[in-house]
Amino acid sequence: MAKKPSSLFVCQECGAVVPKWAGKCEACGAWNSMVEEAQREEVPKGLSGGKGRKIEFVGLEGSSAPLPRLTTAIGELDRVCGGGLVPGSCLLVGGDPGIGKSTLLLQAAAALASQASVAYISGEEAVDQVRMRASRLGHAKAAVALASATSLRDILASLDGPEAPQVVVIDSIQTVYADNIESAPGTVSQVRACAAELIRLAKRRGFILFLVGHVTKDGQIAGPRVLEHMVDTVLYFEGDRGHQFRILRTTKNRFGATDEIGVFEMTDRGLSEVPNPSALFLAERRGNVSGSCVFAGMEGTRPMLVEIQALVAPSSLSSPRRAVVGWDTNRLSMLLAVLDARCGLALSGNDVYLNVAGGLRITEPAADLAVAAALVSSASDVPVPADMVVFGEIGLSGEVRAVAQADTRLKEAAKLGFAQALVPSRPRKDKGAGGGAGSLAIRSIGHLQDVLGLFRHE
């Protein structure tokens, strides 16, 4: 007699499994995320008789030549993928609704169609709707095979054959369902099972698989975290709808560098790549304005210059405001505490607003010194020199620490016409570095107190 399926409750945010329903997930803290799913006995209590087949081991240095990468002719996409697409790889693309995920993949599919067979399977749109978007993007005549399907069984039957396409796009994985799992499409068990079967087929047949993933309100890809572990590359599409810029960021890549970014601009003809994002981010910058500072940062292997804006204003509230866009709020609080305790600059009674212009989000600690310079500039109403770039990490004692790839940052600043740089003091063994900055005047500081002295003497 078959065992009756038991019901368990699975969190749709983190994948935690509990025997009883609860309003709040104890693992991730999400509310109303528990969904009942029927569970069958999937793990055998013991292996039955019969020996397993011995696996074959090979040397680390193989005799076969590595497969060539497939380029999309979209330079920014090839960049974040490590120089092109590896046959048999799986890429997961996530982002907010309407950010441009489907647009980017349709443009990539149309570009790849000239050199490879491409299949675009949509579970969210009808075929005619995809055709309308392709016509708007100017790719109506591209040799892309379209289909609208959500059944995993049908998709596997269509792709598992000698005539399988070389590139497959599934938009999106949350709409695909397996009919042998008793849960709704998009649930943890469905996403996990469907992704595993599609990835297994892609590895066996050697085609490139793109999976579009929905994100939660916190910006994480919906479904189980194991989905990001199964795929080879994870790409996040970031951007603010109020800006035309879109950032494609690599958070995982088995075939290239991680934390690489590609910059795109949203136009009426789709997404166009931005080869020089630094110049674009600084195009609307106004010089000689207090509270504005140019930060020389690194995104992956690419140097990036962006403008950091700060505004310190008197507050009439008992708890002054702290508004941050594009940076870490906790790091701003730490920096304000260091300015107060180590430098005697009390800003606790003021409203503080911080913004990274252009919609870019900065995560590296090298932006500490640029943020501090913008805060001091706004508080003293003395502008940071318009031809100066700033970078450096600040410790809790107020010391300014050196950061990685300083020479690359300085070279990018010199290329864009900046004349001076405010940087951390270099260790003695690195005193000779920085020769690639050209005629850039280097001003080294060792403590945050020196920043206040710089503005007092301006």
Image (cartoon, grey):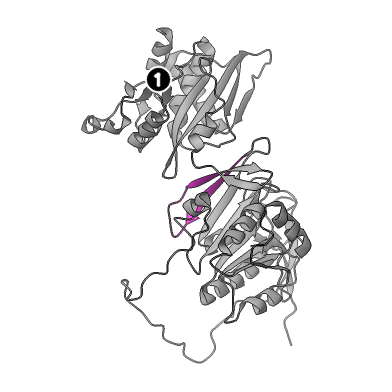
At which x and y percent is residue 122? 71, 63
The kind of secondary structure element at disc 1 is loop
Side of 152 where 380 appears, left or right: left
Compared to 205, does 251 lie above or below?
A: above
Q: Nearer the viewer, residue 457 or 141?
A: 141
Compared to 374, does 21 lie above or below?
A: below
Magenta residues span 245-263
The residue sitting at 43% across, 25% down in the picture is 369
Whether residue 445 is visible: no
Q: Nearer the viewer, residue 64 or 390?
A: 64
At which x and y percent is residue 51? 46, 90
- Identify residue type, mark 1: Leu
Q: Is residue 329 magenta?
A: no
At which x and y percent is residue 49? 52, 91
Q: Quadrant of the N terminus?
A: bottom right
At which x and y percent is residue 280? 53, 33
Q: Nearer the viewer, residue 123 or 39?
A: 123
Whether residue 157 is visible: yes
Crowdedness near tag 1: few (<14), some (14–19) or many (≥20) residues, C-alpha within 10 Å: many
Compared to 394, does 165 lie above or below?
A: below
Side of 240 where 387 appears, left or right: left
The residue sitting at 54% across, 28% down in the picture is 283
Q: How many marks?
A: 1
Q: Quadrant of the C terminus?
A: top left
Question: To which residue does mark 1 refer?
Answer: 448
